[in-house]
């Protein structure tokens, strides 16, 4: 088995995205600003991201562009956040396959060539499908997703585990639920309504939700997402039985319960429901997650529940709104 090695110089792909933007700053705090290289494809980075450490534009489907930055900064770890999410993936399955599969393959090959210490590759609850048990979905279960995003995430988990067992590349990954945050908007997922609802509640006191009121999905607040990702990255390899496919649960609520949590703090808030093509995707995913292996193998335990998250989201977004930033 590969021995765990220290992460010293980290490259983050997808660093301008919803999770990448906050994860990069958290990693810079922990590992030193110059040791965490942020990369994105075409969206301009925020001033904070650009000014707090190195930033490059790369295209994960072009291996040479990854290689250049890896060699220049002597990178020993890649946190591979670049991906096309479920809703955009259904509109453009070819793009989803190209970015999610060829991008991952390039990152893994690069890690193998450079004998890297670690690769972190997120997976998603999108690996599950309608044949999977919906409640308290176990880690080991039926993986027959119906979206291209889900197909690439299942294949990605298998590919990552292959690189671990075949080539000794220490690849780790967790199945993110919907991630809720107030810094960077998500880009093209099915769970995006759970973020948009907060922005609209603060700005306009109303929101037309694109899934039904009774749609229940697993969700997680960004601080827990960052904690889970870094804890898994730093976990003792000898304790891990799983590698690329950890379920991570946090909270589960319906769109109606989410709206009610906001109404407790903004009584005039009104939510209506106008399901679109994303409803079918949401209906194919679990309603709650059993994350026993993550808890047992690396001590996972979330800090936020729905109301605690709502308080923090509304506080932060209200401040940004008053500053004219949203
Ligand atoms: C999406 O909705 O596509 C993502 C995910 C659950 O992976 N947020």
Image (spheres, rainbow, N blue to C red):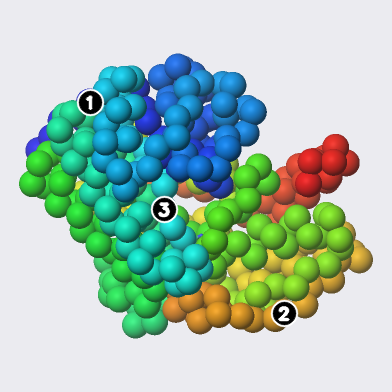
Is residue 81 rendered to the left or right of residue 253? left
Residue 251: x and y, percent? 56, 60
Looking at the picture, tell me which residue is in the foreground, 277 or 268.
277
Crowd class of label 3 (few under 14; some 14 to 19; many from 20; radius 10 Å): many
Is residue 267 rendered to the left or right of residue 158? right
Residue 9: x and y, percent? 34, 22
Q: Residue at x 49, y 65 (%)?
A: 88
- Circle number at residue 273: 2
Asked which quadrant contains residue 76, the reply is top left
Q: CA distance from mark 3 to mark 1?
A: 26 Å
**Label 3 close to label 2 by CB (< 8 Å):** no
Q: CA distance from mark 1 to mark 2?
A: 49 Å
Residue for badge 1:
5
Q: Residue at x 77, y 77 (%)?
A: 272
Crowd class of label 1 (few under 14; some 14 to 19; many from 20; radius 10 Å): some
* Mark 3 or mark 1: whose residue is earlier in sequence: 1
* Mark 3 or mark 2: whose residue is earlier in sequence: 3
Crowd class of label 2 (few under 14; some 14 to 19; many from 20; radius 10 Å): some
Residue 59: x and y, percent? 38, 43
Residue for badge 3:
83
In the rendered image of this protein, does residue 269 appear above or below residue 291?
below
* Mark 1 or mark 2: whose residue is earlier in sequence: 1
Q: Residue at x 34, y 82 (%)?
A: 131
Is residue 215 rendered to the left or right of residue 242? right
Secondary structure at badge 1 equals loop
Secondary structure at badge 2 equals strand
Residue positioned most to the right = 268
Secondary structure at badge 3 equals loop
Q: CA distance from mark 3 to mark 2?
A: 28 Å
Looking at the picture, tell me which residue is in the foreground, 113 or 22.
113
- Circle number at residue 104: none
């Amino acid at each position: 088995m590969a021995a765990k090695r220290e992460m010293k110089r980290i490259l983050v792909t997808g660093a301008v995205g919803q999770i990448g933007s906050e994860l990069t700053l958290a990693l810079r705090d922990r590992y030193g600003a110059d040791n965490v290289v942020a990369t994105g494809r075409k969206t301009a980075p925020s001033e904070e991201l650009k000014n707090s450490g190195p930033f490059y534009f790369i295209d994960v489907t072009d291996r040479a562009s990854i290689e250049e930055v890896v060699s220049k900064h002597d990178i020993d770890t890649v946190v591979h956040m670049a991906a096309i999410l479920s809703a955009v993936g259904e509109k453009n399955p070819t793009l989803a396959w190209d970015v999610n599969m060829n991008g991952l393959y390039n990152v893994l090959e690069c890690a193998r060539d450079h004998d890297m210490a670690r690769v972190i590759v997120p997976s998603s609850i999108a690996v599950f499908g309608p044949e999977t048990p919906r409640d308290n979905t176990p880690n080991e279960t039926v993986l027959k997703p119906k979206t291209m995003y889900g197909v690439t995430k299942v294949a990605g988990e298998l590919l990552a585990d292959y690189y671990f067992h075949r080539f000794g590349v220490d690849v780790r990954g967790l199945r993110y639920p919907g991630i809720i945050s107030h810094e960077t908007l998500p880009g093209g997922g099915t769970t995006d309504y759970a973020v948009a609802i907060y922005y609209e509640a603060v700005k306009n006191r109303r929101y037309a939700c694109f899934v039904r009121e009774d749609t229940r999905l697993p969700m997680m607040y960004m601080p827990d997402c960052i904690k889970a990702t870094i804890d898994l990255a730093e976990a003792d390899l000898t304790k891990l039985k799983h590698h690329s496919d950890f379920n991570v649960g946090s909270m589960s609520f319906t769109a109606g319960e989410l709206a009610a949590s906001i109404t407790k703090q903004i009584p005039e808030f009104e939510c209506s429901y106008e399901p679109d093509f994303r409803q079918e995707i949401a209906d194919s995913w679990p309603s709650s997650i059993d994350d026993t292996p993550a808890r047992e193998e690396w001590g996972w335990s979330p800090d936020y529940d729905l109301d605690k998250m709502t308080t923090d989201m509304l506080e932060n977004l209200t401040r940004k709104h008053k500053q004219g930033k949203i």
